Image (spheres, grey):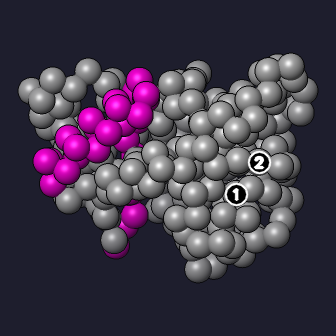
Amino acid sequence: MGFLGQLFKSKAKKSLNLPLDLNQVKIDMHSHLIPGIDDGSPSMEHSLAMLMKFENLGFKKVITTPHVKPGSYPNTSEIILDGYKQLKAAAIEAGITLEIEVAAEYFFDETLIDKIKAKDILSFGDQYVLVEFAFNHPPIFENLLFDTLIENGYKPVLAHFERYSYYFGSMEKAHEWQRKGVAIQMNLSSLCGAYGQEVKRQAEAMLDQFAFDFVGTDCHRIEHLIQLEENLTLPYLSRLNDFMLKNSSL
Ligand SMILES: [Fe+2]
């Protein structure tokens, strides 16, 4: 959220205590729905149940983002696109009308820079690229990553900023990156407490301090969506109704 003045839809239209309207969020841009290629959906059956739940919750489109992490999930663009083709075919056969698109969630390591330079990247929307950092230690050379993306015509999106414990209690980095054109994504389930109280507090602070641009489910299992459904009236989720999220532009 770059400029405070552009954040709110309308000051007069504060929707306090109304459940978060997922029809308005409209598009989810972070999920793991392709079965068997990362730690997301375990089967096509489970993927279809998740897609139906997305539809049910009011989403119009999901952009699914399998992990690309050499060593753990060595997915290539071909593997992801092939899995996407199968997911789409199964969804059509099951009568699911939700729009489904595909990109990836790229783990930041030394191999990613070469991938970007080779343009071997699955982006979404207007050239957005979802990247994640390690959870156990802060990144080094992250500005090289962001600059390389930007120089190659991409728009970096940093996944779930609130989950990196080494940034707990500060929005400084998020704001610094937003100023250079990096979009910040927050997981909706962080606001539900899915990753514990510290992550929840950090997510709430992101909202208080306008340190985010996109929200995503980062849904790996249907349980994540059920938990979201059960928490839509939480005050911080309700407050999202008043924000101009970038999701609907996708
Ligand atoms: Fe993810």
Q: Which residues are magenta?
A: 43-71
> Between residues 76 and 213, which one lies in front from this camera angle?
213
Q: Is residue 132 magenta?
A: no
Q: Which mark is residue 149?
A: none
What is the x, y in percent for residue 19? 60, 36
What is the x, y in percent for residue 142? 68, 61
Left or right position of 246 against 12: left
67, above or below 169, in the image:
above
Q: Residue furthest bottom?
A: 136
Residue at coordinates 79% horizontally, 57% vertically from top-left?
205
What is the x, y in percent for residue 206? 76, 53
Residue named by callout 1: 203
Question: What kind of residue is marked 2?
Answer: Leu
Left or right position of 223 against 240: left
Q: Is residue 53 magenta?
A: yes
Secondary structure category for the residue under label 2: helix
What is the x, y in percent for residue 130? 53, 46
213, above or below 205, in the image:
above
Q: Residue furthest left?
A: 93
Q: Residues within 10 Å of mark 1 (few under 14, many from 20)?
A: many
> Between residues 193 and 86, which one lies in front from this camera angle?
193
Residue at coordinates 27% horizontally, 35% vertically from top-left?
52
Question: What kind of residue is marked 1?
Answer: Ala
Mark 1–mark 2 CB contact (< 8 Å): yes
Residue at coordinates 73% horizontally, 65% vertically from top-left?
201
Residue 10 visible in the shown view = yes
178, above or below 91, in the image:
below
Label 1, label 2: how far apart the Cα atoms are: 6 Å
Left or right position of 121 against 56: right
Residue named by callout 2: 207
Q: Residues within 10 Å of mark 2 (few under 14, many from 20)?
A: many
Q: Residue furthest front?
A: 17
